[in-house]
Image (spheres, rainbow, N blue to C red):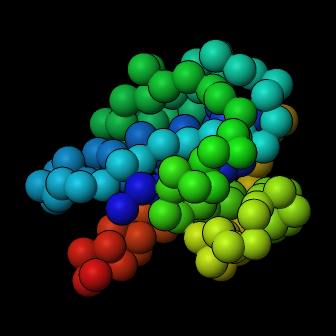
Amino acid sequence: MRILFVCTGNICRSPTAEGVLRRQVEQAGLTGLVIDSAGTHGYHQGEPPDPRAVQAAAHRGYDLSGLRARKLLESDYEAFDLLLAMDQGHLRILERHCPPHHRAKLRRFLERDVPDPYYGDGDGFETVLNLIESGCMRLLAEQRSR
């Protein structure tokens, strides 16, 4: 299974989800999952995640330091089995650009939007991390049941 998390610039929400799920998969001893993240826009192409996201994640034992932002590619629709949008706006963008035969691969990561912490204070990153941790646990349980 190949999973891609998608947010706007790929420096806050989606790399956090990538790092959290990678660690949860590792701790569970699972193999065969490929996890990546991308942004709908290339604002931060090649940059590391936001320092506040890195710090919040590090406090909980997640390492985001090796991740770099990248823009969603047309080939990602083919390459990934599941493309998870962090909010409804991202899902609309994915749907707009997705070839019709890959539409079933698209969905929101959570039933609610994961809020963008970029313009807020550090508490927003903690809130996002809480949502992502629980969402990744559910996603991991879903993958295990397959």
Q: Residue at x 41, y 47 (%)?
A: 35
Examine the rendered structure and indicate whether residue 97 appears above or below residue 107: above
- Left or right of 16: which side holds 85? right
Q: Residue at x 37, y 29 (%)?
A: 63
Q: Quadrant of residue 50?
A: top right
Q: Residue at x 82, y 36 (%)?
A: 41
Examine the rendered structure and indicate whether residue 91 appears above or below residue 41: below
Between 74 and 26, the one nearer to me in the picture: 74
Q: Position of residue 76 (x, y in %)?
A: 61, 48
Furthest toward the top, the residue is 47
- Left or right of 56: which side holds 6? right
Q: Residue at x 48, y 43 (%)?
A: 36
- Left or right of 75: which side holds 17? left
- Of the 4 image quadrants, the one containing the N terminus is bottom left
User: Could one spot residue 90 in this view of the protein?
Assistant: yes
- Of the 4 image quadrants, the one containing the C terminus is bottom left
